[in-house]
Image: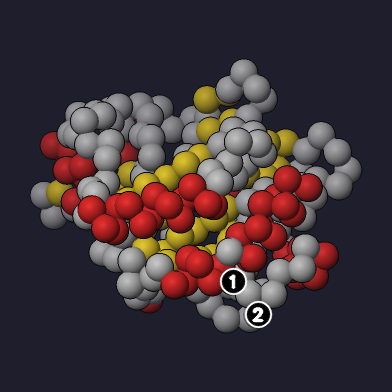
Amino acid sequence: MTLTNGSCWQLAERRPEQFPMIVFYRGLHCPVCKTYIAELDAKLSEFTRRGIEVVAVSGDTNERAQQSCTEWGLTQLAVGYGFPIDEARIWGFFVSHAIKESEAAEFFEPGLFLIKPDRTLYASSVNSMPFARPHFGGVLNAIDFVVKNHYPARGEARRLATAGSLLPDRTRHVPRVKLMQNAQLLSTLGWISVVAGGATAVAIAIDVYRHPQRMKIMNGGERP
């Protein structure tokens, strides 16, 4: 992934003391993103002090991402751009169509991911709307708690739905924690590589559905 400063950000190369934290936002058109990402920029030193490496990502073009940095007053935060809609769907993001001229034709709704140093998923939050995102003060408090208490990743009791052709038969109906123990987030950010019986399959970090086609959500968003 390319950042607005011209450098390349790859998850496989990150070595923070605790977690990489990837914050996905809707884009330049979103006033809620402006407030949210500006707050993240202001709190960046607090995350850094805790051993968290933060990057904010959108599907915007370089030009629009640069404009966001300027108009939103972002001075510290690493900002990536051009994250593909197809990969956003694979991550489990809700995708919206434009309802205003200022919006991109398609864009993904926000999400936040904490990744463990071994590049497996620790925690995630995915929204179907621009509102009710995780508060960064709460995220900081949670990080303090989980680091101090060696709190494990949760969600291990939930069973994944059948993934159809995405997963080998032997991995179906396996508790998520067992999948994640063998899964690595690749440098493209969005893919989980699950190795089973010598075969590599692609799975979704949050939800895996029986059918890969998009499922329409009542609020107008879409997810794969």
Horizontal side of 133 relative to 153 (left or right) equals: right
As measured in the structure, the alpha-carbon distance from the residue carrying label 1 to the one carrying label 2 is 8 Å
What residue did someone put label 1 on?
Answer: 78
Amino acid type of the residue tagged 1 in the rendering? Ala
Q: Secondary structure at mark 2?
A: loop
Q: Residue furthest right?
A: 101
Q: Secondary structure at mark 1?
A: strand
Residue shown at 63% from the left, 30% from the top: 221
User: Is residue 191 at all visible to an observer of this figure?
Assistant: no
Q: Quadrant of the N terminus?
A: bottom right
Quarter location, residue 20: bottom left
Check contact, mark 1 vs mark 2: CB within 8 A.
Answer: yes
Rendered image coloring scheme? secondary structure
What residue did someone put label 2 on?
Answer: 5
**Relative to 54, is 35 above or below?**
above
**Relative to 50, is 169 above or below?**
above
Horizontal side of 211 relative to 1 (left or right) equals: left
Mark in the foreground, 1 or 2: 1
Earlier-in-chain disc, 1 versus 2: 2
Residue shown at 51% from the left, 40% from the top: 126
Total of numbered circles in the picture? 2
Amino acid type of the residue tagged 2 in the rendering? Asn
**Relative to 72, is 105 above or below?**
above
Query: Percent from the top left, x then y, of residue 143?
Result: 38, 55
Q: Residue furthest top?
A: 218
**Relative to 111, is 57 above or below?**
below
Tag of residue 183: none
User: Is residue 150 at all visible to an observer of this figure?
Assistant: yes
Disc 2 crowd, CA 10 A, few/some/many (<14, 14-19, 20+): few
